Image (cartoon, rainbow, N blue to C red):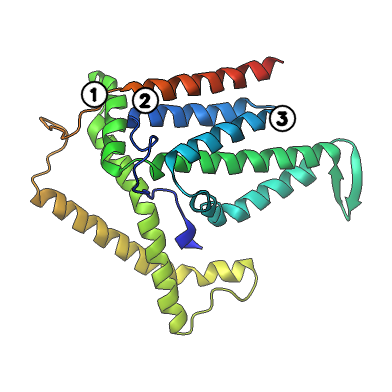
Amino acid sequence: MFKNLTIGQHYPIESLVHELDPRLKILITFAYIVSLFIIQSFPVYILVLLFLALTISFSKVPIKFVLKGLKPIFVIILITFFINLFMTPGEQIFKLFFLKVTKEGVYQAGFMALRLVLLIMGTSILTLTTSPILLTDGIERLLSPFKRIGLPAHELAMMMTIALRFIPTLMEETEKIMKAQKARGADFESGNIINRAKNLVPLLVPLFISAFRRADELAMAMESRCYRGGENRTRMRQLVFRRNDYIALIVFLVYFAAIIVSRFI
């Protein structure tokens, strides 16, 4: 399951989306998340699907690779679906023991599950099309106005990027530890949910040790390269808006305006 996690991974390839300014991609990602929560009806999701399909096609990231990122959160999607299915009041369709299924519940369950799927697919495009260095520079430049009030923009950007990049690394380490313990007779699959959770406790100690070791190695590597934070730091690539950035911004503004207009229609 962990090998299917795409959050924090970078898909190195040349495409129009990869070449966009990271600041623009970060802002568009946040605005995209906001647009999903503005939508109040199913038909409007057609606009989101069109925009997402257009973005994925221009990014040249295989659609199978993007969909693969949904597997680790499939359980969360199911839980969200059934909570909305049984907990939404309205006109009853049928009753399953003490649980009522309503027309409003079916609509809300599908609506929220689709929103969660589109949320994961859309946000994963940011890390898939942006290298860690550019992502750090983009976050730092966006936070730079807050330096006037004492906010350490570079340090925060570096921490956020490292944390994001450590997600697939830690998941891969967890999978290795699980395989090693299974080879020694550990059982992570049998029993109920409580027993499975208890069986996962022995994973925590080696996982924490591995995480601290990797963090220490990273700190030593940064110190050996004379890393001293963002003061007097130069960049090999300067972030400058180009023609494709403005075109992408216009396309997104048209999409966002259509979402807002749909809210009032």
Labels 2, 1: front one: 2
Q: Position of residue 149 (x, y in %)?
A: 26, 19
Vertical arrangement, residue 264 with respect to residue 193, above or below: above
Q: What's the amino acid at mark 1?
A: Gly
Labels 3, 2: front one: 2
Q: Residue at x 35, y 40 (%)?
A: 130
Secondary structure, mark 2, is helix
Which of the two labelled residues, at mark 3 and mark 2, occupies the earlier sequence position?
Answer: 3
Residue 135 in sight: yes
Q: What's the amino acid at mark 3?
A: Pro
Q: Residue at x 37, y 39 (%)?
A: 15
> Which residue is under mark 2?
244
Vertical arrangement, residue 246 with respect to residue 94, above or below: above
Query: Where on the picture, by quarter, is residue 184?
Result: bottom left
Which of the two labelled residues, at mark 1 and mark 3, occupies the earlier sequence position?
Answer: 3
Secondary structure, mark 3, is helix
Nearer the observer, 228 or 14: 14
Residue 43 tag number: 3
Q: Residue at x 69, y 27 (%)?
A: 40
Q: Are marks 3 and 2 in contact (CB under 8 Å)?
A: no
Q: Position of residue 194 (x, y in %)?
A: 61, 67
Mark 2 surroundings: few (<14), some (14-19) or many (≥20) residues within 10 A: some
Secondary structure, mark 1, is loop
Q: Judge left or right: residue 243 versus residue 232.
A: right
Nearer the observer, 207 or 117: 117
Measured in 3D between alpha carbons, the distance from the residue under mark 3 to the one under mark 2, in whole angstroms, is 30 Å
Q: What's the amino acid at mark 2?
A: Asn
Residue 222 tag number: none
Measured in 3D between alpha carbons, the distance from the residue under mark 1 to the one under mark 3, in whole angstroms, is 45 Å
Residue 150 tag number: 1
